[in-house]
Amino acid sequence: MNAAIETLRKILQLESQKGFQNNCVVGGLDKAGPMWRQQAAQAALPAGFVGTLATGLANYPSLPEGRRPQAVAEMLAQLELLAAGVPVAKPPAATQLRPATQQGAKQPEHQSTNKKQRTPPAERDRPAVQRPVPAAAAVPTEPDPNMHLDSPLTVIPGVGPKFAEVLAKLGLSRLGDTLHYFPHRYLDYSALKPINRIEYGDQATIIGTVREVSGRKVKGGQLHMVRAVIGDSTGEIECTWFNQPWLQDQLRTSLQIQVSGRVDLQLGRLVLSSPDWDEVDSEALHTGRIVPIYNLTKGLGGKQLRRWMHAAVYGVAPRASDPLPAPLREKLQMQSLPAALAAAHFPQNQQQLDAARQRLAFDELFALQLNLRQQRAEWQAQPGHALAEPAGWLASAIGTLAFPLTAAQQRVLADLLADMAQPVPMKRLIQGDVGSGKTVVAALALALAVRNGVQGAIMAPTSILAEQHFRTMRTLLAAFPQLDLGGADMPAVRLLQGSTPATERAAIDEGLRTGTVKVLVGTHAVIQAQVHFAKLGLVVVDEQHRFGVLQRAALREKGMHPHLLVMTATPIPRSLALTIYGDLDLSVIDEMPPGRQQVQTHVVPPKERERAYGLVRKEVAGGHQAYIICPLVEDSDSPDTKAVVEEHERLQRSVFPELRLGLLHGRLRPAEKDAIMQAFRAGEIQILVATSVIEVGVDVPNATIMLIEGANRFGLAQMHQLRGRVGRGADQSYCLLLPEPGSAGAAAARNNSNERLKIMESTSDGFVLADKDLAMRGPGDFLGTQQAGFVDLQMARLSDLKLIEMARREADLLFKQDPLLTLPEHQQLAALVAQSAATASGDVS
Ligand code: ADP
Ligand code: MG
């Protein structure tokens, strides 16, 4: 028996024999604390437990006498847990009584003292399976001779046909499946806290005894709530769960459980609402230290599954064949796949877990990168249209513009020309912050296509933007030399949207088929099945992140093998762009047209709304125009519309009665939207009251002020896009952010959004904002749901740019050497890449 445990056990037993008078040691139990803590530390007992016990001792004298028996009982119970986990010569028999909890303290009479009573019936038939998890997640080198990747789960000791069925519900049917059934989180026993030291907002893990359990209906019977009070020797905390009535039976009084969750505040008291919980696993406590927590299903206990996972993972991990060739693994100093798998399930410490994750994440990213390269190679294996520039044509086209191109625009244009001159389909991404002038570059590329006798298409995510592009293209193309667009009406340049009337649509279809329509501008209607081009040579996709992967794939199918140009204002870091758009070449417009002034951004407290209106009035008086953006509303039927309609009415009636206001929202018919935008562009509307529909791409340089209501509801990337609607001309522009007043959301949420607003004030650099957004919200949110399928990586994080870079570099090298992965040493890798292609929905351009 461990001496530290034994010492404290004797003290506590003596205390209870002496009637809880705090006189079993000289000076009181609290004096024993520091000494014991030292002894326990030397014995390397888990710090969390030691802390809890030491605090329990320190607090003991100040406890009311009535509470002392319980405190002693709990300390003894924790000692017993520790003892059970400490490796001793003779493992405790499964039927051994727990003597410590029987001493002194009064125990609830229905307490289970027999460990075996808690095990499910099926397990009782197999007394031999309680083997402890080995201490070290040592690399398993020898596979279990009876375990193969495709063995049924019934080869795991303790798993019979009935449990195999239960496990199948988790997607586990062969032993090999268990290798990738990773824990959804880990419990680090060394990070345990005594209950009296947890604080509001913590992500806390505690170990305690269930002291009370009750269940009742709340909210007029709609919800069932289970409430449990969990205590340790330092204090107690309430936990609540909703609509899990069965917990009332599972959480028996005096059960020792570990509970993890976010600490909340309810009616001034700390609570854990719907925390994860599990019975304390005394074996894991000492052995793993970091204990994997797996998702469970009905009829399966956490300890049980963990034990089986351990048997399975250790049994078959050595059989997992490593997709990374050994020389590469050595070069990158990565561990073997079997070792990484074992450590990802049963890490010995945090470093081991990190290394395992790193290795597994690398595999995912590496496969993804190779997949992207293969896709691109396939795309470019098809012959494309070589579009040459007739001598001097480009210079004279540029000469018709109202401004000289920036150096960045010229550079990007040169990239495009070089690509399009090849008989290989281009795949290029232009990344340029809002207002950097991507449209004119696209127009020149489209004109070059037309000049070469092929058709071009440009797709935008919203009808407002499609309509604006249509206008811009007509203006620009009309001035460019040597394009035969059918005369003043330009019937060769057409707009196609969902709302285009059937007769006009038929005419466009006809024109596309015969080739008289040369440039098609539109929304996703452009890729609908019935649209057929005679000779599609170039496709431009604007504001790419709004388009789904499948839509882009469908568009590509349209043409022979058109050149593809994707434009995005999403200022993601380069290496992230290369992951997400890894099959595209990247050109960056990293320079704004000259004369732009930074948009002055201010957070205006709601109390000072009048001042904000004053500034709007002043700008309008100076001949400029304004946007007022209404907040996102989420909680009723088409609420954005209602809110913006009411706000428009209120502003027109009682704030700006003397000014001409317009209203724009997503529910308007396209013709109405058109009319409003046209009136705004023409200056007939002075203030445009709008929802965030204007977020993308709208270009009215005379607008110099934007007021964003409910700014706290918008994400950084979205606010940046909104703000990009002003500051598009030479005049000083303003962006006023009005957070909503009052109680919306918890304090924490408010802090977060205030921080966002401050960041908006401090920078207009899209890259900085994107980085912050990425850090605050994670890549899934940041990239939007469209990319969600793609972001479906188990281990890799898109914020891990270093690892992404590494995967990209290695993929490049390998691709040069063996593009189709046909070499024998790349067979595992080929399989992994194929699998990655399937889960990443294949096409990411
Ligand atoms: P974005 O890159 O956000 O799509 P736009 O293409 O809409 O930006 O361009 C923003 C504004 O800048 C437009 O009004 C456009 O006419 C103008 N612009 C583009 N290039 C230049 C330039 N080189 N010099 C001056 N103004 C330019
Ligand atoms: Mg644009």
Image: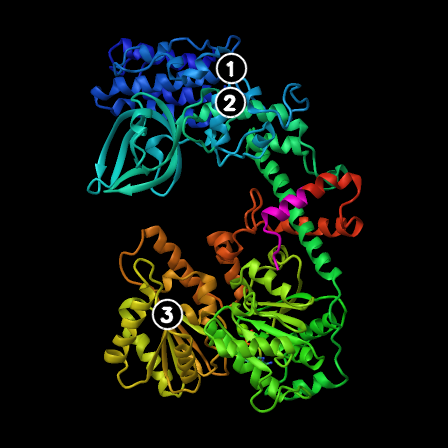
Q: Which residue is mark 3?
A: 667
> Is residue 229 highlighted in magenta?
no
- How many residues crowd around disc 1 within 10 Å: few (fewer than 14), some, or many (20 or more)? some
The quarter in which the C terminus is drawn is bottom right
Do the CB atoms of the residues marked 2 and 1 lie less than 8 Å apart? Answer: yes
Q: Work out whether mark 2 precedes mark 1 in sequence or the reverse, and give the earlier one.
A: 1
The residue lying toward the viewer, choosing from 795 and 457, is 457
Q: Of the numbered discs in the image, which one, if any, rests on residue 129? A: 1
- In three-dimensional space, the C-alpha distance between marks 2 and 3, rounded to whole angstroms, equals 56 Å
* Residue 264 sits above or below residue 541 on the image: above
User: Which residue does the numbered mark 2 point to in the structure image?
Assistant: 307
Q: Name the image quarter holding residue 565.
A: bottom right
SS under mark 2: helix
In the rendered image, the vertical position of residue 351 relative to residue 421, given as above or below: above
Which one is closest to the eye, mark 2 or mark 3? Answer: 3
Residue type pointed to by label 2: Arg
> Whole-percent x and y of residue 667?
37, 70
Q: Is residue 445 above or below residue 429?
A: below
Q: Quick check: 236 above or below 603?
A: above
What amino acid type is highlighted by mark number 3?
A: Arg
Q: Which amino acid, by three-letter code, is at mark 1?
A: Val
Magenta-drawn segment: 832-845
| Residue at 53% from the left image edge and 78% from the top image edge | 495
Q: Is residue 134 visible?
A: no
